Amino acid sequence: MKYEIRNATPADSKIIASFNSLMAEETEGRPLDPNIIGPGVLALLNDADKGRYWVAEANGEVVGQIMVTYEWSDWRNGSLWWIQSVYVHPDHRRSGVFSALYHRVEAIAQKNDACGLRLYVEHNNERAQETYKALGMINPNYLVMETIFGESKC
């Protein structure tokens, strides 16, 4: 099947928020508050400095998504693009949706002089890790650590 990859718009915010909620449940067993995820998606869609979403469509229906945010690297004097909020509807998995989204982002990142792409993946999500490796990504052996302020908000 051929997938159309396009920039997401605010009109896509409900499906993107829904896909984000499904992804959080599936990968982390974590429910997302619709009163936070909905406005969070819209905030990014309305402010390109925060990042960008692209969606994959099949027959006019959104079946997948990818988001990037930006990290400045002083070591590289350039930006790294972080891939986030990846989701492919179960009916379209293993059919090239993620590869199409990834290749679009990769091409746009290179055109915009990004230094590279990064993402984080759950340690036990071996299927996703194999997909990323098949696209040429490597494990640089970094461990992501964080402090979240206010669990109810973040």
Image (cartoon, rainbow, N blue to C red):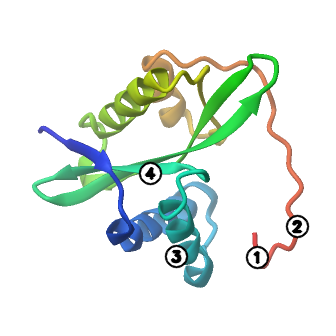
The residue carrying mark 1 is 153
Task: Give the mark count.
Answer: 4
**Circle nearer the viewer, 1 or 4:** 4
Q: Position of residue 113 (x, y in %)?
A: 54, 21
Residue name at image x 77 percent, y 21 percent: 141
Whether pointer 4 and pointer 3 mark residues with C-beta atoms closer than 8 Å, the reply is no
Provide the residue designation for mark 4: 53
Residue carrying label 3 = 38
Q: What residue type is labelled 3?
A: Gly
Under tag 4, what secondary structure? strand
Q: Quadrant of residue 138?
A: top right
Q: Tell me: residue 33, above or below residue 18.
A: below
The residue positioned 61% from the left and 20% from the top of the image is: 115
Q: Mark 2 points at which residue?
A: 149
Compare marks 1 and 3 and give the one earlier in the sequence.
Answer: 3
3D distance between C-alphas at marks 1 and 3:
13 Å
**In this view, 77 is above or below 143:** above
Location of residue 18 with respect to 104 vertically, above or below: below
Q: Are marks 2 and 1 in contact (CB under 8 Å)?
A: yes
Residue 1 % position (x, y) = 11, 39
Distance from Cα at disc 2 to Cα at disc 4: 25 Å
117 left or right, relative to 71: left
Q: Which of 30 and 124 is in front in this view?
A: 30
